[in-house]
Amino acid sequence: MASNDLQKESYHSQLSFGIVILILCTALGIILTKISMVLAFYWISGIGFGFILQKSRFCFTASFRDPYLTGSTALTKAVLVALAITTIGFTAIKYISFLNGQVIPGEEYISPIGLSTAIGGLLFGVGMVIAGGCASGVLMRVGEGFQIQIIALIFFVIGSLLGARDSHWWDTHFMANLDGIFLPDVLGWPAALISQLSLIGILYFLAVKWEASQND
């Protein structure tokens, strides 16, 4: 009985705290609308994404880690579905700009893949598994009060600042003679879209097969 009473007390305490936070978030959102509707939109979007991440436990780290540790590919498949949806959406946006003779959104950010990409990916992959989350996962768990994630977030910021400071050195020494590849320029828009969706489909199929093999 004592344990049940403690659980009920904890539940009511968390509920009260949640209601207070909701009121404060709503009030701040209203205040931001007086300053800038864009800021208010960012605020609401951030809260919405945070809520969805927390409830779904959506995390890129888990999508890579869970197939090896638990055999589950649920998050892996969720990430692949998300990539497929965004591929279609962003292709439509970019293609409309292309047809209208406008600058394709994001085209200036297409970067080549070199040794620095491989090294950075390896370091980030090892780091996010040790930390227990990628950028979104760390932020989500900081909101939940996990202390180790607060430490991870601090060093995430430090590492990002150091990376931004040294990015020119890496580009100069490892990617000076490399060009970025924009698939529609190489394959054409329809073939590029089909190729990427096909690759995502193959990975989804392999994820399903992997989970089935682990459950046998």
Image (cartoon, rainbow, N blue to C red):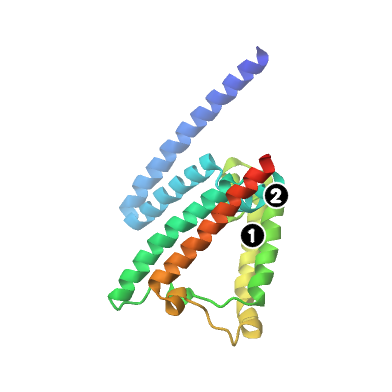
Given residues 64 and 173, the one toward you in this image is 64
Residue 211's quadrant in the figure?
top right
Which residue is tagged 2?
A: 68
Foreground residue, 64 or 109?
64
Label drawn at residue 215: none
Give the residue displayed 43% in from the left and 79% down from the top: 185
Q: Is residue 19 above or below residue 62?
A: above
Front residue of 17/81: it is 81
Q: Pointer 2: residues within 10 angstroms few (<14), some, or many (20+)?
A: some
Q: Nearer the viewer, mark 2 or mark 1?
A: 2
For residue 64, say whether it is visible. Answer: yes
Whether residue 211 sits left or right of residue 109 in the image: it is: right
Q: Quadrant of residue 202?
A: bottom right
Q: Which residue is mark 1?
A: 156
Tag 2: amino acid: Tyr
Residue 177 position within the rendered picture, expressed as x and y whole percent measured from the top left: 59, 87
How busy is the neighbourhood of tag 1: few (under 14 within 10 Å), some, or many (20 plus)? many
Q: Are marks 2 and 1 in contact (CB under 8 Å)?
A: no
Of the 4 image quadrants, the one containing the C terminus is top right
Q: Earlier in the sequence, mark 2 or mark 1?
A: 2
